[in-house]
Image (cartoon, grey):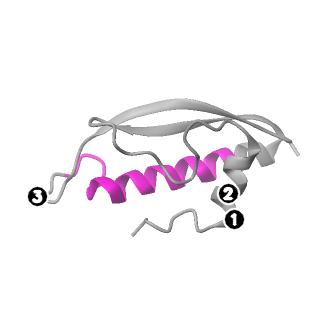
Amino acid sequence: MDYIPEMIRILINLAMQMERQAYLQAGPYERTPERKDYANGYKPKTVNTRLGAITFDVPQVRKGDFYPNALEKGIRSERALKLALAGPVGENIR
């Protein structure tokens, strides 16, 4: 069962990266006239679950007005993950 938290971490991290790309309207190192903002690294966020604490890499943007739908801002419990996984994680991802 030790692999399940790691699989969840990888899945949510990937969904958040894809959501940031959709928000920016550009992929990594891509220059487009439609680009809204620029990627600015990651910030760790630990969420407490029944499987233990899982630390996610939350993508950041320079202007700071982006926060992924996969996690609820300010909530560090399993509730945030349940809400994200119950609905379409990538509904804004194209």
Residue 40 percent location from the top left of the image:
33, 34
Q: Name the residue under label 2.
A: 83
Q: Which residue is drawn at 44% across and 40% down?
A: 59
Q: Classify mark 1: residues with Cα within 10 Å, few (<14), some (14-19) or many (20+).
A: few
Residue 63 percent location from the top left of the image:
27, 37
Q: What residue type is labelled 1?
A: Ala
Q: Name the residue under label 1.
A: 86
Q: Give the range drawn in magenta.
A: 8-30
Query: Residue 73 bears which disc, if any?
Result: none
Q: Is the magenta stretch mostly helix, strand or loop?
A: helix
Q: Quick check: 44 above or below 3? A: above
Q: Quick check: 87 above or below 60? A: below
Residue 15 percent location from the top left of the image:
52, 55
Q: Is mark 2 on a helix, strand or loop?
A: helix
Image quadrant of residue 34?
Answer: bottom left
1 and 2 marks in contact (CB < 8 Å): yes
Q: Name the residue under label 3.
A: 33
Whether 16 is among the magenta residues is yes
Q: Classify mark 3: residues with Cα within 10 Å, few (<14), some (14-19) or many (20+).
A: few
Q: Residue furthest front?
A: 74
Q: What residue type is labelled 3?
A: Pro
Q: Classify mark 2: residues with Cα within 10 Å, few (<14), some (14-19) or many (20+).
A: some
Q: Which residue is drawn at 35% across and 54% down?
A: 21
Q: Earlier in the sequence, mark 3 or mark 1?
A: 3
Whether 56 is among the magenta residues is no
> Horizontal placement of 1 versus 75: left or right?
right
Residue 11 percent location from the top left of the image:
62, 53
Q: What element carries label 1?
A: helix
